[in-house]
Amino acid sequence: MFLGGLPFLLFVAALSKRDPRVLFNDAQVRGFGYLFLVASTVVALWLFIEDGYALDDAFRVSMFNIVSVVTTTGFGLEDFTAWGPLPSVVFAFMMMVGACSGSTSGGIKIFRFQIAVTLLHKQMMKLIHPSGVFVQRYNQRPVNDDIVRSVVAFGLMFFVTIIILAGALSAMGLDPTTSISGAITAVANVGPGMGSIIGPTGNFAPLPDAAKWLLSLGMLMGRLEILTLIVLFFPAFWRR
């Protein structure tokens, strides 16, 4: 699952150069690895301290579920929604993040968060040094304004889609946990949601048919990265 969350082009580059270090020199891969290790460790320590798991079992269970959720693979080893408030918050965040761009995973993707962090750092430096000139860089390369605009636009539409979808699901009588996590897991293409109905030990069968249609649309939009599908509804797109 972890390997499936890495950019496939880097595998090609590593094979062609016969140098596996190509994978680890990429900022996105390092960020994905750090996120996975930190989240797994936090959840494992929670299970060890609060839920009485043996330390090796805590790491095994947490790492399996974390990598499954963040790579949007869809496997569930245990009901992680029953582990307590902190793991629930961690898993809700990991459901949206996704793994690397160019991989099999869904979600927002690691590189968009990294570019957002570099943008935040640039804005903070501009506040400290108003006359300074700062070049935004990612993976040792300058980031142009087109990339920044695309990241901001996608992030905005990602959350707007989740809000609209969650609102529609709640209007059908679904509880807030099912509505919000169902919208997130559909748009991010994760698989299981959270709660007693669509959590890791449940499924989407009890939901109304209209909810299943909406979730299907959300999955399609998430897999096509939202903007690609929305642009089809603009008349200007079809004009030459």
Image (tube, rainbow, N blue to C red):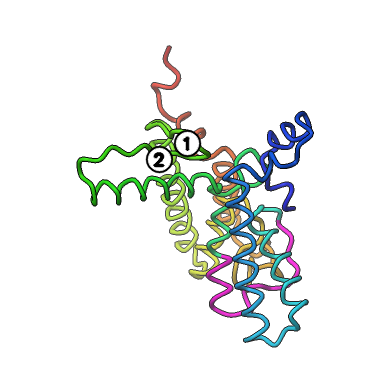
The residue at which mark 1 appears reads as 227
What is the secondary structure assignment of the residue under circle 2? helix
Q: CA distance from mark 1 to mark 2?
A: 8 Å
Horizontal side of residue 21 vs 34, given as left or right: right
Q: Position of residue 166 (x, y in %)?
A: 47, 58
Q: Position of residue 96 (x, y in %)?
A: 54, 55
Identify the residue shown where x is 70% and y is 58%: 68
Front in this rendered view, residue 162 or 7: 7
Q: Residue type at mark 2?
A: Ala
Q: Position of residue 89 (x, y in %)?
A: 53, 70
Whether label 1 touches label 2, CB < 8 Å: yes
Identify the residue shown where x is 61% and y is 45%: 100
Sequence-first tag of 1 and 2: 2
What is the secondary structure assignment of the residue under circle 1? helix
The residue at which mark 2 appears reads as 153
Identify the image quadrant of the C terminus.
top left
Task: Look at the image and give the residue range highlighted in magenta.
Answer: 74-91
The crowd level at tag 1 (other Cα within 10 Å; few <14, some 14-19, many 20+) is: some
The crowd level at tag 2 (other Cα within 10 Å; few <14, some 14-19, many 20+) is: few
For residue 36, above or below residue 17:
below
For residue 42, above or below residue 227:
below
Front in this rendered view, residue 106 or 172: 106
Viewer-side label of 1, 2: 2
* Extreme-left residue of the structure: 131
Quarter of the image for residue 19 reads top right
